[in-house]
Amino acid sequence: MSVVLVVNSGSSSFKYQLIELDTEAVLASGLVERIGEEVGHARHTVKVASPVPGEAAPALVDATFERDLPIPDHTAGFQVMLDAFAEDGPSLEEHAPVAVGHRVVHGGARFFEPTLVTPLVLINIEDLSVLAPLHNPGAVQGIRAAQAAFADIPHVAVFDTAFHQTLSPAAYTYAIDAQLAAEHRIRRYGFHGTSHKFVSEAAAAFLGRPLDDLRQVVFHLGNGASVTAIDGGRSVDTSMGLTPLEGLVMGTRSGDIDPAVLFQLARRAHMSINDLDVLLNKKSGLLGLAGVSDMRDIERRREDGDPDATLAFEVYIHRLRAYAGAYLAQLGGADVICFTAGVGENSPLVRAATVDTLAFAGVEIDPERNEARERGIRRISSDASAVTVLVVPTDEELEIARQTLGVALG
């Protein structure tokens, strides 16, 4: 039995999943949060047997156990997680992980594949914190705590940026002073790589076509959002850049913006670098335009005639269409367009509006298929469409587990 523990650590929390890869079943999942505060919180969810009237075999249902207690640091957090496994199951003796996979947001230009964590690799991840100060330090804390808790098995770092290491210099280079850019590692890196990789491969498998033969545009639309042009399984262009701020309009992030806007706000509104950082990352996007960051709220308010929500939706779609057109041009056309993540998987309105102007490229949505509330991977394009349009639920944790097992087995 090949079991992998997947960990996604932040500065004050971490999420985890225990995945059995022979069946790709999630045995347990959880969240440990508010680390370092006076009272922390832990949530552990596991499958338990529940009797079904008239059936001999019980059904497996999710049972969630929650705890509030002091969690001073990540090491204590991992002990809380271990206690949850011991008390609520499943037993880590019966389902012992063969490796731990760690999501790491930024691998810079150094890491282009899943990598066994060594002391030198950990130093490099920590050094890359200058490029991801909000993410990599938490990953380092999580890795160290996990290594203490699971000292006898491999630990593997899987990088959000790795999938985009196939970008050409023309795609990743910013047109600024070359020496300054090289000195400070200023270039486009791209993010959501594990999701884009998982979705593009799942789409090829669903269609029964070789990944190498497909030109795909994948829209990962969640609170954070990005779109990637994928040619033969290789990322050739992507909307996020040096950081996850560039590109599409997101829940709280602005996406693309004229850099001179920052100069103007600094001069006229007397905003500091920190003020501008907070503005663009936490107070912009849908939140900045309409006061809410959830697309479901935007759609409800738009339906009620709210002008702010209507404008926010139109700005959001305008940017999606702009990138769709750009990436069709970069690829010379597309065979498949995929929608994934929270908005991409659940908003027929966003999907339809995004591709509404792509008839020139042979894209045609089937309204009934698009509106269907089915789960799982599904086709939403018409039978006459020259481009297949799919909804593909993403599973970044499963992708991390797969890559981790590949490294662990050598």
Image (spheres, grey):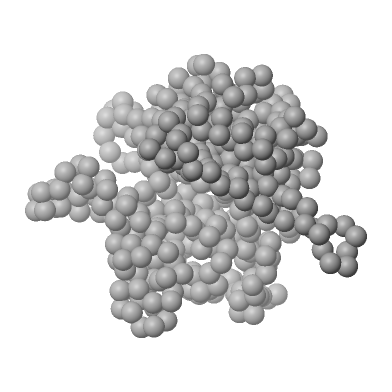
42 left or right, relative to 51:
left
**From this viewpoint, is residue 165 visible?**
no
Residue 138 or 89: which is nearer the viewer?
A: 89
Looking at the rendering, which quadrant does residue 299 occupy?
bottom left
List the single residue furthest toward the top.
Answer: 119
List the single residue furthest toward the right.
Answer: 56
Determine the residue positioned at 71% across, 32% down. 92
**From this viewpoint, is residue 291 visible?**
yes
Determine the residue positioned at 43% across, 76% down. 300
37 left or right, relative to 367:
left
Determine the residue positioned at 31% across, 66% down. 291
Residue 120 or 151: which is nearer the viewer?
A: 151
Q: Is residue 121 above or below residue 162?
A: above
Determine the residue positioned at 40% across, 58% down. 250
Q: Position of residue 118 (x, y in %)?
A: 55, 18
> In which quadrant is the N terminus drawn?
top right
Q: Position of residue 22 (x, y in %)?
A: 79, 41
212 left or right, relative to 262:
right
339 left or right, relative to 281:
right
